[in-house]
Image (cartoon, helix red, strand yellow):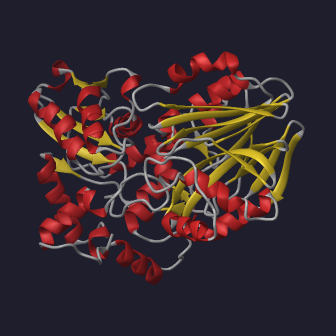
Amino acid sequence: MSGICGVISKQDCAEKLFYGIDYHSHLGTEFGGIAMMDGERFSRQIHEIAQSQFKSKFFEDLPGLKGNKGIGVISDSNEQPIYLNSRFGPFCIVTMGLIENADALVAELLAAGHSFAEMSSTGPVNTTELIARLITLGDDLADGIERMFERIEGSCSLLILNKDGIYAARDRRGYTPLVIGKHADTYAVTSETSAFPNTDLKVVKFMAPGEIILVTENGIASKREGNAEMQICSFLWIYTGFPASDYEGINTEAVRERCGAALARRDRDISVDVVAGVPDSGTSHAIGYAMESGKPFRRPLVKYTPGYGRSYTPPIQQQRDLIAKMKLIPIREIINGNRIAVLDDSIVRGTQLKNFTINKLWDAGAKEVHVRPASPPLMFPCKFCLATRSIHELAARKAIHNIEGRDVEDVSEYIDSGSPKHQKMVDSIAHDLGATTLRYQTVDDMVEAIGLPREKLCLYCWTGECPSSGNKEKGNACRASCGKD
């Protein structure tokens, strides 16, 4: 997942933009970028941040950044921002999302005589450049964005910087969030509200799905109204979002505490001595579990410095494993002889949880290890952002394959948390992990913890139901097609 940020003011806004982008560092691991306008002059900086932090890479650039408007990105894949001199005039663009039909769109544009100049680390072209090219096919920028929305499969939210100001557009399903903040004569558009408190901004508006807004020094102007329907990513609250961020007015930390409490209420049949979270995202879930169960929250595993970042987001398994191994340090005095409930946001592949969390607890003398993921078993790779890349990576799918002796297209019985097949799958995963017990969050409890109606949430990676499908029959069809991935 990526994060985007834009700031516009009647004064120079370089410093506010710099820190606003930095407050999105938890969302991407590959590239950071800034583009600013000083009068009609663009300046742009892009750095690789895979082995460093945004602040350290861009701090020396800050004195040279000048202008009253700018955009930036923390990117999970391609280099951004992209600069394009179009028939609408020059502009810079940053995007977040995943375009499933990118190859087909590229082939179509190449056949029509278009060219692509930017490099890509994930495909034949830079996805942000592809989005920019599609937008230039419209009658103006707003029309081009709307037409682009109609052409793509997947998700794309974006910011465009040009002489008019900053165009902000949230993807049509509202899968990724965009929020507008204001302080005095400064406006900002960001993915995360956590960028606001320390930059003195207050939330003005959560943008609607499909909404297009032009932000200028004088305020915000609607270019296209948004949609009433929404399926925002549930995983924002469970894992990817920052604890201090709000989405649709709902705080992430509070949701995670409610998730942990729900897991504790289903655990009346076990007794533990210590409640622990896999840092960082599991910590909030563990606090909720401890509050509900009355058992002490302690830290048997501590994370060494924020510099190690997230082990989930890097594109290479070797990188993910190295980060997972090095960042968590066990404390034997807290682990030895104790029955421990371990809260994590999810189980994706399972290899890191087994090798670099559970085994560390056993090696340090744990008496029992009870694993409690705060979300249901992940069954499908995300269609809307760069997360899990293949269906065969998922721990639940590997367990199903072992049980059935083959890949299974219809996994509806395994998704049903009340079915014998679901329990058999969970037991298989628990055995593979080496956990004393394993109990997943249910979809219903997770939805209740978030607090939005189920139809407003994207639950695709757990249920396989396509957003906006609205019925079980279409959901089953979507599950079957994705099961062939």
- Res. 328 image quadrant: top left
Image position, residue 183 (x, y; %) = 79, 29
Q: Is residue 32 above or below residue 249?
A: above
Image position, residue 189 (x, y; %) = 71, 41
Image position, residue 266 (x, y; %) = 30, 52
- Res. 441 image quadrant: bottom left
Q: Is residue 258 visible?
A: no
Looking at the image, which is closer to me, 281 or 320? 320
Looking at the image, which is closer to me, 366 or 11? 11
Q: Is residue 186 left or right of residue 238?
A: right
Q: Residue at x 37, y 72 (%)?
A: 482
Farthest residue to the right: give it.
218
Q: Is residue 231 visible?
A: yes
Q: Residue at x 32, y 63 (%)?
A: 379
Looking at the image, which is closer to me, 183 or 309? 309
Q: Residue at x 72, y 24 (%)?
A: 14
Q: Is residue 378 above or below residue 92?
A: below
Q: Is residue 465 left or right of residue 86?
A: left
Q: Is residue 470 left or right of residue 379?
A: right
Farthest residue to the bottom: give it.
473
- Res. 171 image quadrant: bottom right
Q: Is residue 160 above or below residue 378?
A: above
Image position, residue 232 (x, y; %) = 56, 57
